[in-house]
Image: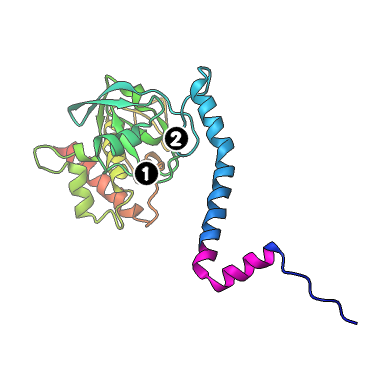
Amino acid sequence: MSKPPLPPSDDAKAVSQTECNPDLARRRFLQSAAAAVTVGAAPHLHAKESQMNDASAPAPTGATGTVRSPVMPVKLTINGRLHQLQLEPRVTLLDALREYVGLMGTKKGCDRGQCGACTVLADGRRINSCLTLAVMHEGESITTVEGLAQAGKLSPIQQAFIERDAFQCGYCTPGQLCSATALIEEFRAGAASAATRDVRAKPTELTEAEIRERMSGNICRCGAYPNIVAAVIDVYRRQRTA
C-alpha cells in the first residue's frame, strides 16, 4: 500500500513560486547579493573607521599600496627658465621633466640607466635623468633636447644628425643628441676615455674609436651607429677648423 505524498516544504514552495514568477526570482537574487556584500564589507568598514580614529595609523597609501611622501618645493632651472615645482622627494628628474614640466623630448626607455634615452645635461655634464632625483639638482642648469636649439636655430649636432640621417625611429635621438653635445666639450677639456691610448696626456684626435667608446652609454636599437659617429666627427672637425 503506497504512502500518501508529504506536503511540500517551505523551500519547495519558494522554488515553485520563483519558477512561476521570474520577477520574484530576480528580486530574491538581488536581496541575497546585497546581503552578501554588506556582510563582506562590514569588517573592512570597521577597520577603516578604526584606522581613522587611531592617531598612530600609517600614512595614506596610493593606488599601488605605496606610502605617499609629503611634497616639498623644488626650484629647477631648465633650458634657462626657472620652474617652481611641488614634488615628492623621491620623484626622479626624468619624471619631473616629463610629468611636471611637460618636456616630453627626454624619453623613458629602460628606467634603470642602461639605454641612455633619458640623457640630459646638468651644468654641461651628461647624466641619466632616470637615476637621479629632481631635488638633487636645485641650483644647477638642466638642458634637455628642447634646449639645444637657440633662437630657433638648430645646434650644430642637431643639424649634423639631419645631414647624416643619424636616426631611424628617433626614440633614442634626444639622449644621443645631449650625449654627443657633452662628448665634444669633454674631449676639448682633455677628458680621457677607455679608448685613449695615453690617459696621462690630453687626447688630440677624436677618432671613431673614441666616439664609440664615449657614446657607448646610448643604445640605438635601430642600429644607426655609423651615421651617429659620422655626425659627431663632422661637428668636431668643423669646430676645430673654425
Dot 2 alpha-carbon crowd within 10 angstroms: few under 14, some 14 to 19, many 20 or more: few
Q: Which residue is mark 1?
A: 108
Q: Residue furthest right?
A: 1
Which residue occupies the foreground of this view, 183 or 133? Answer: 133
Q: How is the image coloured?
A: rainbow
Q: Tell me the residue at 52%/64% (across/down).
A: 24
Q: Residue furthest top?
A: 55
Q: Amino acid at mark 1?
A: Lys
Badge number at residue 88: none
Residue 113 position in % (x across, y down): 44, 38
Q: Quadrant of residue 32?
A: bottom right
Q: Residue furthest left?
A: 151
Q: Tell me the residue at 68%/63% (across/down).
A: 11
Q: Main secondary structure of the magenta part?
A: helix
Q: Which residues are magenta?
A: 11-26
Which residue occupies the foreground of this view, 199 or 4? Answer: 4
